[in-house]
Amino acid sequence: MSISLCIEILLCVLLVATLGFCLILERKLSAMRKGQDGLKALIAELNGAIGAAGTSMRLLKSAATGAVEELDQKVGAARAAIDELSVLTASGDRIAARIERSLEVQPRPQTSVLPAAADRLAGVRPRIVRPKMPLDQVMEGVR
């Protein structure tokens, strides 16, 4: 056997090994390309979801802003009603106190009418029932 034949056999063996290595490398590269295509699809899907989430966040923010403005208006109206009711309640308390003082201070006038006419008027006139407790306590039940 000559040396050139041995070298050619060795080169053939090395070529077969290189061919096998190239086949393995080609399979791995094709698997990587398939994974890369799947990754591209996944990235595109995630990008769409992020866009939709951004739109939803903007809509939610505008809805929240509208709700805050409406709530501020209602709170302002409620505070105005509270102030008005406080003034009315204080006015009612002052009027009730004046009425109570006037009932306590003014004696009942004596009638100079004949006794028979006074009896008839007493039957017609409504009677004022005074509470046995102070007027403030009576008014608390009304509030």
Image (tube, grey):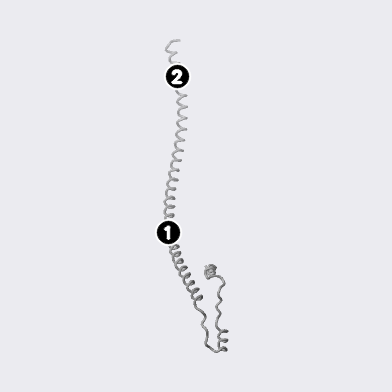
* Residue closest to the eye, 84 or 19: 84
Residue labelled with disc 2: 14
Rate crowding at label 1 as few (under 14), some (14 to 19) or many (20 or more) other CA atoms within 10 Å.
few
Residue type beneath disc 1: Asp
Which part of the image, by quadrant, shows the N terminus? top left
Q: Position of residue 137 (x, y in %)?
A: 54, 68
* Residue closest to the eye, 132 or 46: 132
- Compared with 96, 72 (above or below) is above
Residue type beneath disc 2: Leu
Q: Position of residue 128 (x, y in %)?
A: 55, 78
Query: Of marks 2 and 1, which one's residue comes earlier in the chain?
Result: 2
Give the image quarter of residue 32: top left
Residue labelled with disc 1: 72
Rate crowding at label 2 as few (under 14), some (14 to 19) or many (20 or more) other CA atoms within 10 Å.
few
* Residue closest to the eye, 71 or 80: 80
Q: Position of residue 65 (x, y in %)?
A: 42, 55
